[in-house]
Amino acid sequence: MYKPTIGLEIHVELKTKSKMFCSCPNNFEEQQPNVNVCPICLGHPGTLPVINKEAIHKLIKIGLALNCQIPEHSKFDRKHYFYPDLPKGYQVSQFDLPLCKDGYLEIFGKKESDPKKDLEKRIRINRVHMEEDTGRLIHTKGTDYSLVDCNRAGIPLMELVTEPDIDSAKQAQKFAKELQLMLRYLDISNADMEKGQMRVEVNISLHKEGEPLGTKVEIKNLNSFRAVEGSIAYEIKRQTNLLEAGEKVVQETRGWVDDKKITASQRVKEESHDYRYFPEPDLPALRFNKEEIDKIRAEIPELPQERHRRFLLEYNLPNKEAEIMVDNKELGEYFEKVASELLNWINLEEMKSEIDTEDRLKLFRLCSNYMLSDLQNLIKNSSLRADELLISPENFAEFITLIYEGKISSKIAKVLLPEMFKTGADPSHIIKEKELVQVTDESEIEGIIKTVINENPKAVADFQAGKENALKFLTGQVMALSKGKAAPDIVGKILRETLEKNSA
């Protein structure tokens, strides 16, 4: 049985106003080629680069979030290789003195009530360093040439290199997802893989237990989590078949062919000495003191894993709901604002008993249920994000309180929420305007029930014969006749009493 040994190299374009070594805009949305360029990022002779302080600051922040050591001394190096999208003929990168080193990221399994009990793996991080991105080759279909767009050349590019601690395709995918989420929480990068802002490369080899590590193969430029998982799974199978047939695995760079779900050979892998690294002579060395690092550390907000753990414990959310709230940062922040407003509406701050605490948690669960079902559906059908909603947290909290206290039915809620979403008006105003007030008058409800019983003699007979489902049918008819306005608990009570009285 062959065991996979997997390491990842992940490149991430940082979110900064300008490029890494010049003042050209860092604008990934620019469609017109070669407009965000200047003599520096085009590599013209005699030009001098200047280090982007914001980019260095952001890279150190992600390094600290990943538990890395930040050396007091760092520098840039020239990495030489020749490719059409590299204007200078070398890339400014870092070799032996990276900005961040020796960190780790933990990934979890089920993430139940105490995620620490479900630690799946601590994946060590060898280094996180800074470099500049290359240009972009554009291949036009039906032609025998490629065009070069240098808008991307010189954009600040973070490279993260893990230790070969990963042992499955699923683990690799989890690591990449967790990293992407962390980058977004820190506002370091949008890390959109489809737009090339985050690119994953895999190093993988196979060996038998107790034997030396096998020959390493690199899979380049994976631009989706599905591609990361699929390429590793395929490569494990391909290398296993080679080794079992007595053949050798060649050290090479391979690419993922998405439509065929296979990897294909691209070129023989270079060694580090092929890049002829040497210190970048046009840039000064970097030095940091403890006060500077501590100041950056203090800027780190609550990170995804910490938030996930807190949502489970503080709001009693099921694991899946907490995960969605964490993955969608804006939605999670909106939920917390609503939760805070709910305490004001329901006055739970003054409740002290265990029963009151249980009620508080039920209220949060009700809020989460409506937010992740009805509200999410409305968001998906619009172009809005959770932080752009017209519904204020206070109005959504009032909406949940009306449901919780039985003042509106679920059917009225289905009509009310879309109106709130569309107009931003408070629920009380819409209820009055649309005449959605719940009917709680027992005599009025008794009249509706009497009509339903007279119109449905078969269902009444079925109930009297012991068929409980008939009661659900009759309840539905009452709610329909009242246009969803009758209070469901009062309907259920009076309907059962009336039916039982008639059968006595």
Image: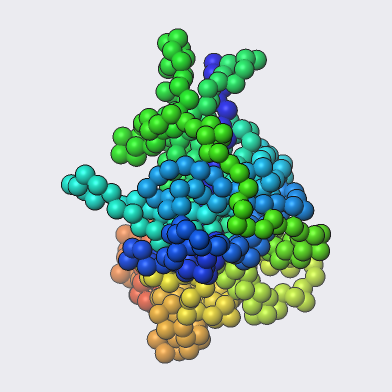
Give how far across and how far down residue 249 sits, in percent. 46, 20
Look at the image and tell me whether residue 387 can be seen.
yes
Question: Which coloring applies here?
Answer: rainbow
Look at the image and tell me whether residue 309 can be seen.
no
Residue drawn at (39%, 50%) of the image? 85
Q: Nearer the viewer, residue 404 or 82?
A: 82
Instruction: Note whether 422 is above or below 126 in the view shown.
Output: below
Residue drawn at (28%, 49%) of the image? 146
In this view, the residue farthest toward the left is 142
In this view, the residue farthest toward the top is 246
Q: Nearer the viewer, residue 410 or 341?
A: 341
Give how far across and how far down residue 43 sits, in percent. 46, 57
Left or right: where does residue 349 sit relative to residue 1?
right
- Which part of the image, by quadrant, shows the N terminus? top right
Give how far across and how far down residue 26 sits, in percent. 48, 66
What is the tally of numbered marks visible in this picture? 0
**Which quadrant of the figure has residue 345?**
bottom right
Q: Nearer the viewer, residue 49 or 492?
A: 49
Instruction: Note whether 447 is above or below 212 in the view shown.
Output: below
Q: Nearer the viewer, residue 88 or 204?
A: 88
Left or right: where does residue 92 sit relative to residue 454?
right
Residue drawn at (47%, 58%) of the image? 45
Give how far across and how far down residue 21 sits, in percent. 55, 62
**Which quadrant of the figure has residue 313?**
bottom right
Instruction: Note whether 434 is above or below 351 in the view shown.
Output: below
Residue drawn at (55%, 42%) of the image? 9
Instruction: Note whether 275 is above or below 300 in the view shown.
Output: above
